[in-house]
Image: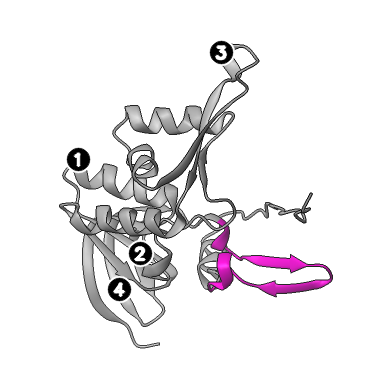
Amino acid sequence: MKKYEAGKCDIAVIGAGHAGIEAAIAAARLGMSVICFSINLDSVGNLPCNPSIGGTAKAQLVRELDALGGRMAKIADRAAIQYRALNTGKGPAVRSTRTQTDRRRYQELMKHELEQQENLRLIQTEIVEVECEDGKLSAVISSGGGVYSCRALIIASGTFLGGVITVGENRIESGPDGLKPATELSKSLESLGLPMRRFKTGTPPRINR
C-alpha cells in the first residue's frame, strides 16, 4: 500500500459513537487539534441496539457526562420522543429517567455538533494501522494509505474491533448494522503487543405479547 501524508493533529480519535464523540469534543474544547475518524459518517452517534438514553445506572452516567460538559444529555433531550421515570415505587437511589430517542434525529444532531466544533475535523475513513517510532506513537494510517501524524490516540471503536455477529449457527465478521468491522486495526494493535480480549453482547428474541 502506497502511503502519503494526509494530515496531522494533537489527538486522533478512532470512532464516532458515544465515547468517541465526547472525547473528541472535550479535547477540542481544551484547545487541542483533533481529528475524529469514522468508518461511515452516516453512522456518527448511532444507536444500533436500543434507541434510548438513560435508565437504571445508565442515567447516572449521562448526568455525570452532562455535569462535565458532555453533549449526550442535551442532544437526547432534543431528539426525545418519550420520557419515562423508572423505579418510582422504590428508593431514590434506584430511581432514574429514560428517554426514547429518534435515532436518525439524534445522529443528525450529533454529527452537526462535531462539524461545528472548533479545532475538530470529522473524517470518513477506516484506520487500519497504528504507527510507532522508537516505542512512541507517531501516526495512524487509513485503509487508503493516508498517514495522519498525531501526538496522542484515543481508540473508541466500540464493538467494531474484530467484530463478529452470530445469528443461530451463522457467524460473520461485521460491525453494528452491517457496517465493516475494524479487523485490520485489531491486528495492528496485537502486533504492537497489546493484549486483546473478546466481550460478548447479546440481543435476545423479542416476544410480541
Callouts 2 and 4 close, C-beta under 8 Å: no
Question: Is the Cβ of the residue at disc 3 closer than 8 Å to that at disc 1?
Answer: no
- Write down the region rendered in magenta: 159-180
Which of labels 3 and 1 is toward the front? 3
Residue at the disc numbered 3 = 92
Q: Position of residue 122 (x, y in %)?
A: 28, 63
Residue 48, quarter of picture: bottom right
The residue closer to the viewer here, 75 or 30, is 75
Residue farthest along the right direction in this orientation: 169
Circle 3: residue type: Pro
Which residue is painted at 57% across and 29% down in the image? Answer: 57
Distance, label 4 to label 1, CA atoms, is 24 Å
Question: In the rendered structure, which disc, 2 or 1, sits on the residue that comes first in sequence?
Answer: 1
9 vs 146: above or below: above
Circle 4 SS class: strand
Where is mark 1, residue-wise? Answer: 30
- Of badges 3 and 4, the one in the foreground is 3
